[in-house]
Image (spheres, grey):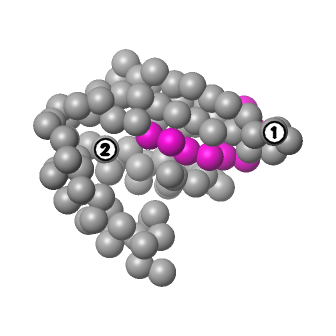
Amino acid sequence: MSDAPNSEEFYKKLKVQLADTALWPTAYLYKFIVPTDTEKINQIEKIFDNLGAVITTKQSKNGKYTSVSINVRMKNPDQVISKYKEVAEKVEGVISL
């Protein structure tokens, strides 16, 4: 299970990929899926507070889940990864895409 989004191996691969594919700082698009719950959505939004992020949410057809897209300018791959880790740590049931 080395490619699970919360594994160190996953983050190492992501860092290399980010370093190779973009000039930093750059705009980065995060996508998360959470069970539809205002509290969980607010937790994610709070993590990206004060970064000038553009956040959009969209509920699934049956309303059970909400996708949260966050477009934000990040300084470097480490900053991108630290936000992924923060979301995974603080928001129960989140899926990072």
Residue at 24 percent across and 56 percent down: it is 17
- Secondary element under disc 2, as helix, strand or loop, is helix
Whole-number angstrom distance, CA of label 2 to CA of label 1: 29 Å
Residue 36 in sight here: no
- Of 91 and 17, the residue lying toward us: 17
Residue interval drawn in magenta: 30-38
- Residue 53 rendering spot, x and y as whole percentages: 41, 23
| Camera-nearest residue between 86 and 97 | 97
* Image side of residue 93 versus residue 37, left or right: left
- The mark found on residue 80 in the picture is 2
Query: Is residue 31 highlighted in magenta?
Result: yes
Q: Position of residue 36 (x, y in %)?
A: 75, 40
Q: Is residue 84 left or right of residue 45?
A: left
Mark 2 is surrounded, within 10 Å at the Cα level, by few (under 14), some (14 to 19) or many (20 or more) other residues, namely: many
Q: Give the x, y percent position of residue 77.
A: 22, 47
User: Of the numbered discs in the image, which one, if any, rests on residue 61?
Assistant: 1
Q: Give the structural element (helix, strand or loop) at label 1.
A: loop
Look at the picture and state if 48 lies above or below 79. Answer: above
Q: Is residue 26 visible?
A: yes
Q: Name the amino acid type tagged 1.
A: Lys
Of helix, strand and loop, which mostly describes the magenta segment?
A: strand
Query: Which label is found at residue 45?
Result: none
Is residue 46 one of those drawn in magenta? no
Q: Residues within 10 Å of mark 1 (few under 14, many from 20)?
A: few
Q: Residue at x 60, y 52 (%)?
A: 94
The amino acid on which the numbered mark 2 sits, given as a three-letter code, is Val
Residue positioned 51% across, 25% down in the render? 55
